[in-house]
Amino acid sequence: MPRVTFRSVRAVSLAVATVLAAPALPGVVAPAFARPAPDSFADLAARLLPGVVNISSSTLLTAQNGPGFGGPDIPQFPPGSPFEQLFRDFMEHNKKHANPAEPPRRMQSLGSGFIIDAKGIVVTNNHVIEGADEISVTLQDGTTLKATVLGRDTKVDLAVLKVKTDKPLPALQFGDSDKSRVGDWVLAIGNPFGLGGTVTAGIISARGRDIQQGPYDNFIQTDAPINRGNSGGPLFDMDGSVIGINTAIYSPTGGSIGIGFSIPSNLAKTVVDQLREYGHPRRGWLGVKIQQVTPDIAESLGLKDPGGALIAGVDDNGPAAKGHLQNGDVILKFDNQDVKEMRALPRIVAETEINKTVPVEVWRNGKGETLQVRIGELPDDQQTQVAAVKPDQSAPLKPLPLAGLGLKISPITPDSRDKYQLGQDQKGVVITDVGQGSPAADRGLKAGDVIVEVQQEEVNSPAEVLDRVEKVRKAGRNSVLFLVQSSDGLRWVPLSLKADGKRQPG
């Protein structure tokens, strides 16, 4: 195959761009000009390599603490932790060759990190050093330094280490990950399989990935080859700034298949600063339970688009309650940031400065409203139970059917509290029967669930539920919104208001 130089490719690209520069036809994607790849990454890599370190973590194991000696089972390390397989292999060995007199063994694993302060501050993943009793940092020149942990964050999977040094160390700078675009070139440097400083290149494949690793997932996806041992290493843009921290890979084999994930620098910077100052993360707290706004829920609330985060519970003593947020509000904007989907809100709130008063735009009673809320600090043992009031005991006891919805409801009585194990302060109307194949059954409702609100209004009797449903039906809406308390907690449930309540052919 004839060799094609970057120069010739660029000339052809320019020529094509000129020919195709005419306005695109409606519905036709206009051609775009892509910059050529760098001739070499060598100069950039040479400048960055000294700031990347290898991290060696070790822990002392004895035969007596394994299975068969009355000791613990395999410790619960985070998925993908380098210690996970080591412990498993060690425990399996103990089962086959148990010897209480066997001397202690030190198990070791390797990872990556990078220097952010010339005085010896190093950033890595928490899972790289999780469970370790000794941590060593090796510089590019081969110097090995003992490290201590300044702080760690298990939810974002970050740790900050400190090493003692008698000379300034080469420090790297965080960049602005929000400016990075899908398709941008990136470099990854780390310690895959313990081989030492290794440079790989690729592009940003996607942004905002949620891989179910934690409540604040917002990963950058890259095809730059990342393997075991790269964890904690930096992902660089072409200016040499750290825009990500390599944390996880998707791989059925354990090796790179071109799907790696990095914590964005803008999320990492906030956590790292907190770990350095306090030794633990300090996150903003709103004090609400939320759920996704589905198309059915949006329609029942009069929302044009199914976006935002629906409040399904408010902590009595939390910032939201003090700021007059209510159950059933849909949060559309928080501190002037759009909340396009539910999972974005916890991260936005967590990154908000504690004690800062922010505007919160909500959808309430068919219109938008902006409230001012002062953000608190996320407590370790946050409680988010909703306040309850006693129901009206004077309502009739006969179960009332809700036509078209496939359920029967009844007031809460001492008998129903015992039968369905309801709390003494539980408010609302209890569901006593759910018809098979009905809209209620399709949504997972069952006998013993309690309807707390209908269309964001409290209900304490079957008559009130029926009245709210009929008002919605007369208004011409396709669904009605219930707030339901079940054994799993509070949730908003939209139910179809089709005439017969039966399934329609699709």
Image (spheres, rainbow, N blue to C red):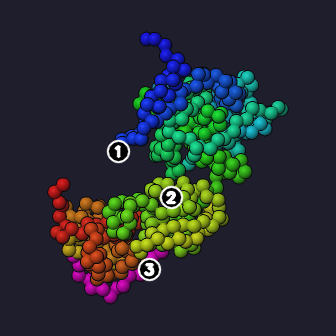
**For residue 237, what is the image quadrant?**
top right
Residues at discs 3 and 1 in contact (Cβ within 8 Å): no
Which residue: 60% across, 48% down? Answer: 267
Q: Residues within 10 Å of mark 2 (few under 14, many from 20)?
A: some
The span from disc 3 to disc 1 (Cα, nearest Å) is 57 Å
Which mark, by number, is residue 27? 1
The span from disc 1 to disc 2 (Cα, nearest Å) is 28 Å
Nearer the observer: mark 2 or 3; the answer is: 2
Q: Is residue 281 above or below residue 369?
A: above
Which mark, by number, is residue 304? none
> In terms of sequence position, does the residue under pointer 1 or pointer 2 come before the other?
1
Nearer the observer: mark 3 or 1; the answer is: 1
Secondary element under disc 1, as helix, strand or loop, is: loop
User: Which residue is the extreme one toward the top?
Assistant: 1
Q: Is residue 125 magenta?
A: no
Which residue: 60% across, 55% down? Answer: 351
Magenta residues, start to end: 387-401
**For residue 349, what is the image quadrant?**
bottom right
What amino acid is found at the position of numbered circle 1 in the picture? Gly
Which residue: 65% across, 34% down? Answer: 239
> In terms of sequence position, does the residue under pointer 2 or pointer 3 come before the other?
2
Residues at discs 2 and 3 in contact (Cβ within 8 Å): no
Secondary element under disc 3, as helix, strand or loop, is: loop
The residue labelled by disc 3 is 389
Nearer the observer: mark 1 or 2; the answer is: 1
Nearest the eye: 250 or 37: 37
**For residue 299, what is the image quadrant?**
bottom left
Which mark, by number, is residue 338? 2
- In the rendered image, residue 25, in percent from the top left (x then y), is placed at 36, 42
